[in-house]
Amino acid sequence: EVQLVESGGGLVQPGGSLRLSCAASGFTFSSYSMNWVRQAPGKGLEWVSYISSSSSTIYYADSVKGRFTISRDNGKNSLYLQMNSLRVEDTAVYYCARERTGYGLDVWGQGTTVTVSS
Amino acid sequence: EIVVTQSPATLSLSPGESATLSCRASQSVSSYLTWYQQKPGQAPRLLIYDASNRATGIPARFSGSGSGTDFTLTISSLEPEDFAVYYCQQRSNWPPKWTFGQGTKVEIK
């Protein structure tokens, strides 16, 4: 079964850091680009970051650029999001999503919740 | 930067009725437009890619159309499980990013 499972969410104070992980199974992880997408409480979807299959290409949304770092370990079938200098407005459910070229974000995890609050 | 706008924000319909959801891009995105469905407490699910192609396992009552700046998602006869929020999304090459619309909620009337 193709599956993505996020972990690492939690409660953190403003200015703090958190590292999210996404474990992939059931497909050849190293063949796919991956993304992080977030959803603030009661709000819509916001794309956060993209990483190509080989990590050679990385993009960030302007809202997180300079604070968040996406990475992956193809040997461990895992995707990561290092989040520094967290703000209250970063509070959201964070999803990892597989990107199939020309197709879209076709596999999503169940999400992990990040709450930034003092 | 491309802005994606969905309308209406909410659609109140009864099961069996047809739903028409609109998505407009501020500049042409060719046919690189994707639709997702999201139910409460669940992750989004890919419905339509390249504006008009159904993803694997998506029922034929879902159809997409359009190109350039104006796109439509049609649900021909609403089933109880279709009441959800629908998002359109486009991918731009520069600046490189995915942009989601704000969503259309299809609710039971």
Image: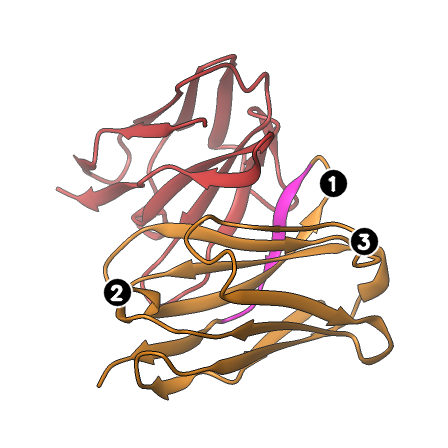
Residue at left offset 56%, top offset 68%: A109
Residue at left offset 37%, top offset 42%: B86
How many angstroms separate mark 1 from mark 2 (CA)?
29 Å
Whether the magenta-drawn stretch holds residue A104 is answered as: yes
Whether the magenta-drawn stretch holds residue B14 is answered as: no
Helix, strand or loop at label 3? It is: loop
Which residue is labeled 1 in the image? A101
Q: Which residue type does callout 2 highlight? A: Pro
Q: Disc 1 is attached to a residue of which chain?
A: A
Residue at left offset 46%, top offset 58%: A64
Q: Which residue type does callout 1 highlight? A: Thr
Q: Tell which circle, 1 or 2, labels the residue nearer the N-terminal end.
A: 2
Which residue is labeled 3 in the image? A56
Q: Which residue type does callout 3 highlight? A: Ser
Q: Nearer the viewer, mark 3 or mark 1?
A: 3
Say which mark, if any, is on residue B36.
Answer: none
Circles 1 and 2 on the same subunit = yes
Circles 3 and 1 on the same subunit = yes
Magenta residues, as a range?
Answer: A103-110
Helix, strand or loop at label 2? It is: loop
Which residue is labeled 2 in the image? A41
Q: Residues within 10 Å of mark 1 (few under 14, many from 20)?
A: few
Residue A39 occupies quadrant: bottom left
